[in-house]
Image: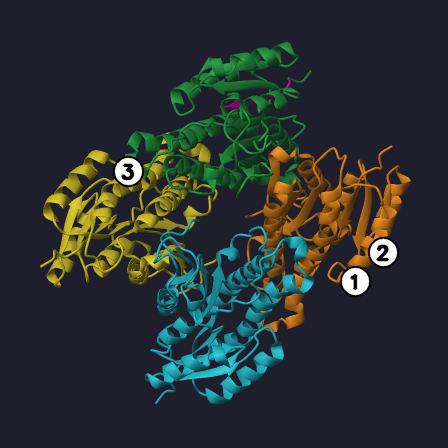
Chain colours: A cyan, B yellow, C green, D orange
Amino acid sequence: MAAKPFAIIAGVGPGTGASVARKFAQAYSVVVLARNPENYDPLVSEINSSGGQALGLSADLSDSTSVKSAFDKISQQYKGSPLAAAVFNSGGGFVRKPFLELTEEEFGNGFKSQGIGAFNFAQHTLPLLQQATGLEHPPTLIFTGATASVRGSANFSAFATGKFALRALAQSLAREFGPKGIHISHVIIDGVIDIPRTKNWANEHEDGKLDPGAIADSYWHLHTQPRTTFGFELDLRPYVEKW
Amino acid sequence: MAAKPFAIIAGVGPGTGASVARKFAQAYSVVVLARNPENYDPLVSEINSSGGQALGLSADLSDSTSVKSAFDKISQQYKGSPLAAAVFNSGGGFVRKPFLELTEEEFGNGFKSQGIGAFNFAQHTLPLLQQATGLEHPPTLIFTGATASVRGSANFSAFATGKFALRALAQSLAREFGPKGIHISHVIIDGVIDIPRTKNWANEHEDGKLDPGAIADSYWHLHTQPRTTFGFELDLRPYVEKW
Amino acid sequence: MAAKPFAIIAGVGPGTGASVARKFAQAYSVVVLARNPENYDPLVSEINSSGGQALGLSADLSDSTSVKSAFDKISQQYKGSPLAAAVFNSGGGFVRKPFLELTEEEFGNGFKSQGIGAFNFAQHTLPLLQQATGLEHPPTLIFTGATASVRGSANFSAFATGKFALRALAQSLAREFGPKGIHISHVIIDGVIDIPRTKNWANEHEDGKLDPGAIADSYWHLHTQPRTTFGFELDLRPYVEKW
Amino acid sequence: MAAKPFAIIAGVGPGTGASVARKFAQAYSVVVLARNPENYDPLVSEINSSGGQALGLSADLSDSTSVKSAFDKISQQYKGSPLAAAVFNSGGGFVRKPFLELTEEEFGNGFKSQGIGAFNFAQHTLPLLQQATGLEHPPTLIFTGATASVRGSANFSAFATGKFALRALAQSLAREFGPKGIHISHVIIDGVIDIPRTKNWANEHEDGKLDPGAIADSYWHLHTQPRTTFGFELDLRPYVEKW
């Protein structure tokens, strides 16, 4: 019997990452990565206790040694299993400050998280995606963007440089790996996501925040597209969002 | 029993329009519009004979009298049924010519087809979408764009002006009707669609053309999104497409 | 002695058009076009009485017969003079209304003014620009855009479709006529222009409106660029503008 | 007598930077920065011997200590002089390679050069620009972009992430410092620049490369705009460039 395909979701907290993991766990074994095990432990338990298969690994994506160590474990654990999908969902590097108050480190953290983090993740997942055989859908690598991916707002230079860089990387990989049959996508999340941390954020509309489950449905839809019809970029926002 | 919701697909030929109609006919009764009944008759028969419900109506979307006449028939026929989705898929107005060889009529046909046609369609469908109740998914209006929606190429001024205008309309409507709960989307089809007419077009890759069925799946996915998480724009292209 | 080159500025009112005419009149004989002679008569007198040469012609750019008649007069008057620059600055087609209150005519006026108007203007000026010899700067055709050229806002569908279409035309012509040595540019005016009509518009900053003279300086700068270094698109806005 | 204003141009080699320095030296005293004195010594001599004033300083913009040291010297030397303009023109971080062959260092160099370099430059120049008084034109900070600022091509991920990040920074600063009267601009250089190193690059057109002098004229034009009419982004390319 062929080994069950697996998916890797990097950047798993209470929002998009966890919902994407739950969704992809309906079809695949999933590996979830986060710096802090607290961020994935409940999710891993939840998936494993409801008939799915999940493995949590601690990794700092901006640290190549840490990433290598995590992928060594993945290679051992999933030897013979094809990698069906990889999702980069890191939310790190956010800081909102007047430019002249930013330290070089704060400024650089946007790129460290979104640029170097995505670089390390892509360096390790693309070879696995290229080797994968026997998949129902084309192997897929999805990057999570934000409003700051297409707009450099005042006081957001650190995060926007990171998110612009991530979008550049996604375009570059789509043009290089698309013709090799790898589906690269970039999803722009334009609005506040409905998670515990944002529950009490003022919003005049009770349903004015993005639903992580619905975001996950879109990621899954992108993954299921045949290579004749690859979607590259999709922007998602609440119906009441100003844009 | 509540009346079955219906969908209206305008611009039905052998490609995207027909596939979208087939897809939406799995959930809804569908009305298909085209200038020439030859373009929808086989499709209507196919859907009706396979358990679905379809009605074909002849209409020239760029002619307000013709559109009004078609929607009068729709109102009679579907009285009491909620309109769940409307898709504008007109491909008209295409001409490829050096600018100085274009007649004013040829140039204007791009906008007549894509701008006025979409205006008439939106004027008639938006009130129905706003009235609809009891739907499973938010009422949806999707516009079909093309490479020329975001790029004015040499010799494509007529088509590009039409498609740029259509995108402007879609953005404008999304910002006005999104907050009213209507889902407005714009899909950029960037490549050749695999239909009988393009079968023999040179392509070094046998699967290098967009699959209308997969395009329809994306339209359906957009339609099913909850209003917390509306997708506005998605670009679709074959994996081997240069962009 | 070689004939003095001339420039044609279409859409001359109290703002950008008049300032561009004054600026270009420092080097060239200028023809100014407007529907209503009231819009150019004072300007023509001003230029002629201050050492320049100006001719005013009444023309409705969206009416090909009217445009042809104006260009017949231009051909007679400027026989033997090279056309150095042409500027399309029509502001017509503006209407701000909820979409469902727009008539087809109101909606279509955006394209009629910005699309057909620009088409007619380009059809008549491009052959003259291509024939021009002995010029100091490459022959130039500049189109005036607006915020609505890149953003379809709620209630602005008529104007935005026109301005998006104009931008598509400009791109298309730049790609076709650039390699022939014609400089095509598109300038996005993002803000309120400081003219008599807007004098009393609320603005918390006394210098928060665009200066038509400074806009004209940018048009002239674009015109003077050599063909090795053509600028295509420039966005101009007041320092306090939100964008 | 008021002290002569000065300008700082960072990233001076044989192309854009040197031409911008020559141009701005016609009005201002200029400081030119480059890592290697070989890159600015001939230029400094040329400007000083032809009636201008130039100072060359060695600095690695991506190294905050090196930048601080250079600006300490500038502060001493130009005490009392207002900073009229600053130009970031670093071309570093370029590498063209298949993604999987890139090292983390190579990938990160794009951001190190274009992101961190621009951060350090802006951190030191913005306070000086804000303090400047008695200037003829608004204080100005211009960033040099490239094709890769708006397009992530295959094999260009390192450079594109850097240039996308630089554009994000420029937007962010324009929105924060524009309202404070500082003019922030971003110029997209889309094509090969005509410098000694590219002299023998194949080009079917003898004038198919960008002229650094003409680029400098555009930078100067942007600098001279009043704050009512700030240009943010301008794209420059040879007339024969495909885009």
Most prominent secondary structure in the magenta stretch? strand
Specify the segment rendered in magenta.
C4-10
The chain carrying label 1 is D
Tell me residue C144's x, y (percent): 51, 32
- Per the image, the residue denoted by label 2 is D37
Q: Picture quarter containing residue C208?
A: top right
Identify the residue at horizontal 62%, vertical 80% (top origin).
Answer: A65
As helix, strand or loop, the secondary structure at mark 2 comes to helix
Q: How many labels does the image show?
A: 3
**Chain under label 3?**
C
Residue appearing at x 9%, y 59% in the figure: B1
Relative image position of residue D126 (x, y in whole percent)? 71, 48
- Image disc number at residue D65: 1
Near mark 1 (Cα within 10 A), the count class, few <14, some 14-19 or many ≥20, is few
User: What kind of element bears circle 3?
Assistant: helix
Q: In which quarter of the image is the N terminus of chain C?
A: top right
Q: Is there any visible trace of residue B70 in the rendered image?
A: yes
| Residue with the mark numbered 3 | C100
